[in-house]
Image (tube, rainbow, N blue to C red):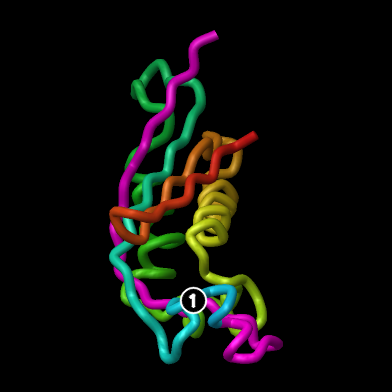
Amino acid sequence: MARISLTRRVVFAAAHRYRRPEWSEERNFEVFGKCSRAPWHGHTYTCDVSVAGPIDAITGFVVDLRRLDEILAREVMERFDHRNINTDVPEFAEGLLVPSCENLAAYIAARVQTALGDSARVTRVWLSEDPTLWAEWVAD
């Protein structure tokens, strides 16, 4: 059976640092390299969120675009844009989630899915911090 998905892209700027507070600075540098150095460094992230579901016979949409845009504005842009992920997003605070592309993509997928409820299914989140590094979260 065919499946249709819809993808919306958002772009945001944010700072972060990879660090485990229980490790020494030397151990952090050994594991995370330059990304562990104080204070923080920034990226312009590109984030594609794909959702799938049946096409509504009346609107022709998988999901109401206005609703998806509102969700992405709240769950991605307001949360991350021009923020320090380590200090401004509680789940990534010192000693919690390391703000890697992988963790960020999984986090965004979960937040968007919760906000969408059963109206559509998040199938993919592609997150790039620069042209040479990205992570892709794909639904099972």
Q: Which element is circle 1 on?
A: helix
**Three-letter code, disc 1:** Gly
Q: Nearer the viewer, residue 110 or 63?
A: 110
The quadrant where residue 74 appears: bottom left
- In the picture shown, does residue 106 fall above or below 91? above
Q: Residue at x 43, y 38 (%)?
A: 50
| Residue 139 image offset from top left, x and y in percent | 59, 37
Q: Is residue 88 above or below residue 103?
A: below
Specify the segment rendered in magenta. Answer: 1-28
Picture residue at 44% right of the left edge, 21% below the top? 4
Is residue 70 visible to the viewer in this orientation of the structure? Answer: no
Q: Which residue is mark 1?
A: 33
**Residue displayed at 70% across by 87% down:** 22
Badge 1 density bin: few <14, some 14–19, many ≥20, Cα 10 Å: few
- Residue occupying the far top of the picture: 1
Q: Where the N terminus falls, by quadrant?
A: top right
The image shows residue 52 at horizontal and vertical percentages of 49, 29
* Residue 116 is one of the magenta-drawn residues: no
- Camera-nearest residue between 121 and 118: 121
Q: Would you say residue 107 is visible in this rendering?
A: yes
Give the side of residue 41 with respect to residue 90, left or right: left
- Coordinates of residue 55 in the picture (x, y in percent): 43, 20
Image location (x, y in percent) of residue 134: 41, 52
Q: Nearer the viewer, residue 54 or 8?
A: 8
Left or right of 84, for residue 118: right
Image vertical order of residue 135 relative to residue 30, above or below? above
Q: Is residue 37 above or below residue 70?
A: below
Choose top left, top right, bottom left or bottom right for residue 94: bottom right
At x 67%, y 86%, the residue is 23
Out of 87 and 61, give the one closest to the viewer: 87
| Quarter in which the C terminus is drawn | top right
